[in-house]
Image: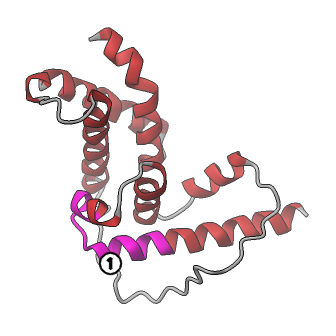
């Protein structure tokens, strides 16, 4: 079990910290996730890789944590978001740390959807199922996160130049 822990702990921590944006909370969630995984190894059916199964546990534990903090995911279907998907992105080179720090400042709901979609590779239907929201809310949250991130980065770039 120790070898499994060493093999996966950093990747699972990275997934978790992107969702909860707090080192101490992420460490607690990772610990709880590994305990839960090791206690339920007999339920691992091998339909996916162990890493995928463990990541799902980490994501579910992170979402449970966020919900306990009363960060409920609500429908925002009526939110008007102007997103021009064809807009040319002509940004100067951006420091990855600037992007990471900007993502951390996004509203929690939008940040979680952005991370699940862009970084974890889930589609909106899966995100909707995971977060218990509608698929259109997932898309709206994603567009909102993208718009806010774009605005934050443009502001940072203007400030630097």
**Residue 13: x percent and y percent?**
43, 33
How busy is the neighbourhood of tag 1: few (under 14 within 10 Å), some, or many (20 plus)? some
The chief SS type of the magenta part is helix
> Camera-side residue: 149 or 7?
7
Q: Is residue 64 magenta?
A: no
> Camera-side residue: 50 or 109?
50
The correct choice, above or below, for 111 with respect to 154 in the image is above
Q: Which residue is mark 1?
A: 136
In this figure, what is the number of numbered marks?
Answer: 1
The answer to which quarter of the image holds residue 159 is bottom right
The answer to which quarter of the image holds residue 16 is top left
Write the residue at 32% across / 16% down. Answer: 4
Give SS at disc 1: helix
Q: Is 96 on the left-hand or right-hand side of 132?
A: right
**Residue 101: x percent and y percent?**
63, 51
Write the residue at 63% across / 57% down. Answer: 102
Location of the N terminus (image quadrant): top left
Write the residue at 32% across / 37% down. Answer: 55
The correct choice, above or below, for 110 with respect to 137 in the image is above
């Amino acid at each position: 079990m120790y070898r499994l822990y060493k093999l996966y702990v950093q990747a699972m921590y990275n997934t978790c910290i992107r969702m909860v944006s707090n080192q101490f909370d992420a460490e607690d969630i990772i610990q709880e996730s590994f305990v839960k995984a090791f206690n339920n190894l007999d339920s691992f059916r091998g339909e996916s890789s162990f890493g995928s199964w463990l990541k799902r546990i980490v994501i579910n534990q992170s979402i449970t944590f966020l919900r306990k903090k009363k960060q409920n995911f609500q429908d925002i279907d009526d939110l008007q978001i102007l997103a021009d998907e064809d807009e040319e992105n002509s940004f100067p080179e951006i420091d990855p740390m600037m992007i990471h720090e900007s993502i951390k400042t996004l509203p929690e709901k939008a940040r979680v959807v952005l991370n699940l979609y862009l970084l974890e590779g889930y589609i909106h239907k899966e995100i909707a199922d995971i977060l218990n929201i509608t698929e259109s809310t997932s898309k709206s949250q994603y567009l909102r996160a993208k718009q806010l991130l774009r605005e934050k980065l443009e502001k940072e770039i203007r400030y630097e130049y």
